[in-house]
Image (cartoon, helix red, strand yellow):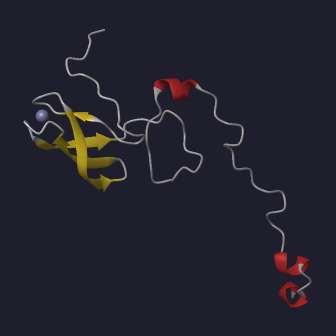
Amino acid sequence: MNKPTIPYISAKKPGDPGAVCPHCESRASIRHSLALTPLIRHIRYRCDNDDCGHVFVAELVVIRTCVMSAIPKGSIDIPFSPRTAALPMPANDAAPEPANDDRDDAAIAGDTDAMT
Ligand SMILES: [Zn+2]
C-alpha cells in the first residue's frame, strides 16, 4: 500500500473534519459550510499558515454506512460498507405487527355509541 503524499492532520476537536492546504500542506480551518443535500456539504476552509492564506472549498460526501442509525430516516439511502453488510442485523430490526392491532379502542374504553 502506498503512503499518502499529503500528511494526515487530525481534527482539532471531535466532529471537526480537518483539512490540509493543497499549496503549503499546513492545517486549514473551517470558515463556513453549506449543506447542498442531506449527503453532500460544501466546506470553505482557510489555510492556518498566514504566509499562505489560501481559501478553498472542499466537498464532504457521505459515501457509506459503518454503523446503522438507531433512528433511520426512510428517505436516506446510504450503502453499507462491506464489513457492515456482513454483520447480522440487530434482533430488533423487524417491526412485527401487534397481535391486538385490529381492536376497537372505543369499544374497549366503554363507548357504546362507537359500537353501533
Ligand atoms: Zn496554505
Direction left: furthest residue: 51
The one of 62 and 47 positioned closer to us in this rendering: 47
The residue lying at 35 percent from left, 35 percent from top is 11
Residue 68 lies, in percent from the top left, at 54, 39
Direction bottom: furthest residue: 113
Placement of the C terminus among the 4 image quadrants = bottom right
Residue 106 lies, in percent from the top left, at 84, 81
31 to the left or right of 50: right
Placement of the N terminus among the 4 image quadrants = top left
Q: How many marks?
A: 0
Q: Is residue 101 above or below residue 96?
A: below
Q: Is residue 67 above or below residue 111?
A: above
The one of 2 and 71 positioned closer to us in this rendering: 2
The one of 19 and 51 positioned closer to us in this rendering: 51
What is the quadrant of residue 50 in the picture?
Answer: top left
Q: Is residue 76 above or below residue 66?
A: below
Q: Quadrant of ligand 1?
A: top left
Direction top: furthest residue: 1
The residue lying at 32 percent from left, 54 percent from top is 37
116 to the left or right of 50: right
92 to the left or right of 115: left
The residue lying at 24 percent from left, 22 percent from top is 7
8 to the left or right of 82: left
The one of 70 and 31 positioned closer to us in this rendering: 31
Residue 27 lies, in percent from the top left, at 22, 33
Residue 91 lies, in percent from the top left, at 72, 37
What is the quadrant of residue 36 in the picture?
Answer: bottom left
The residue lying at 47 percent from left, 36 percent from top is 65
